[in-house]
Image (spheres, rainbow, N blue to C red):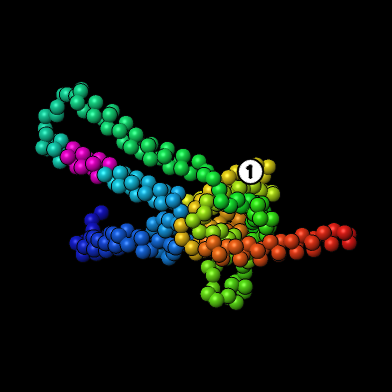
Amino acid sequence: MTMSKGRFDRRLLGAAVIGAMGALIGLGGSALAGEGQPSPWEMQLQNAASPVMENIVWFHSFLLWLITAITLFVLALLVIVVVKFNAKANPVPSKTTHNTLIEVAWTIIPVMILVAVAVPSFRLLFFQLDIPKADLTIKATGNQWNWTYQYPDDKIEFTSIMLTDEERAKMNPVPPRLLAVDNETVVPVNKVVRIQTTAADVIHSWAIPSFGVKIDAIPGRLNETWFRATREGRYYGQCSELCGKDHAFMPIVVRVVSDQEYDAWKKQQQVASAARKSYASIGAGAQ
C-alpha cells in the first residue's frame, strides 16, 4: 500500500504538533499540577505538601531521567547496528563469538543501575514506614461508604460523608464534585500526624496524593502511617480500594490550618462530640 505525499506530510505535521504540545505540557508540569486536588490536563504528580511526597516526586523524576537515558542509549545501539551491520554495508559478517570487555560491561552496568535505583528506593521506604513521634493521632475507620474519624487524645469523633450536588451548590466557593465532605478532617500545619486505619466491613484504603499517603483499612487490623503537612489548605483524596458499589463516593478531605485555628476547631468538636454522646445515651435509655 502506498501513501500520497500530501497525506504523509499531513500526518508528519500532526505528529510534530502533538510532540510539541507534549513537550510544552511536560515543561509546564509544575504549573499544571494540582494543589491538593486533580487539575484539568494534569500530567504530573500533585504538588507535594509533605516531606514524604517531596521525596516521592524527586524519586519519580530521577527514575524518569534514568529510563530516558537508557532508552536513548538502546535506541542509539539499534541505529548503529542497522546502519553499520546491514547486509549491504557489511557483506561479510564477523565470526566473533566472545568479547570479554562487552560481557563484563553488560554485567556490571545493569548492576550499577539497579544499585542506583535501590538505594534511594530503600531510603524512601524507610522514611515512609519509620513513624516519628506524633503530635496528633487520628483513627480513620472505613465504612460502606463513608469515613468515621476519632481523635483519641481529644475525645473527638465524627463521620465524614460526601456532599451532594445540591449541598455543594449552596456553598461559596463551590467545592470540587465527588471530593467535598460535610465534616472535614482538620490538622495543624507542620505537625506530625499519625493516621491509624481500620474498617468496619470490607477493605478500604485511605489516601491523600499530596501527602504521599496511601494505606489500607482492613477489618480486624490496625494499620498506621504518618504525614506532616507543610502548607495550609484543603487536600483531597478518595478510598483507593474497590469496596463496593459506592466505592467512588467516599472521599477524604484534610484541612490544614494554623495552631490557633486548630485549637478553636478542637474546642467546638469536643462540645459537639459530647452532645452527640449524650443524645445517644438518652436514646438508648428510652429504648
Q: Residue 246, located in which quarter of the rendered image?
A: bottom right
Dot 1 crowding, Cα within 10 Å, few <14, some 14–19, many 20+: some
Q: Residue 273, located in which quarter of the rendered image?
A: bottom right
Magenta includes 79?
Answer: yes
199 versus 8 height, above or below: above
The structure residue drawn at horizontal position 46% and vertical position 60%, both measured from the top left corner, is 231
The N terminus lies in quadrant: bottom left
Residue named by callout 1: 222
Is 171 on the left-hand or right-hand side of 152? left
x and y, in percent, of residue 67 in the image: 31, 44
The structure residue drawn at horizontal position 63% and vertical position 51%, both measured from the top left corner, is 139
The C terminus lies in quadrant: bottom right
Any part of residue 204 in sight: no
Magenta includes 112?
Answer: no
Closest to the observer, 74 or 105: 105
Is 214 on the left-hand or right-hand side of 204? left
Boundaries of the magenta span: 70-82
x and y, in percent, of residue 212 in the image: 47, 51
The structure residue drawn at horizontal position 52% and vertical position 63%, both measured from the top left corner, is 258
Any part of residue 51 in sight: yes
x and y, in percent, of residue 141 in the image: 65, 51
Closest to the observer, 260 or 73: 260
Is 184 on the left-hand or right-hand side of 26? right
197 versus 257 height, above or below: above
The structure residue drawn at horizontal position 36% and vertical position 38%, both measured from the top left corner, is 117
Label 1 SS: loop
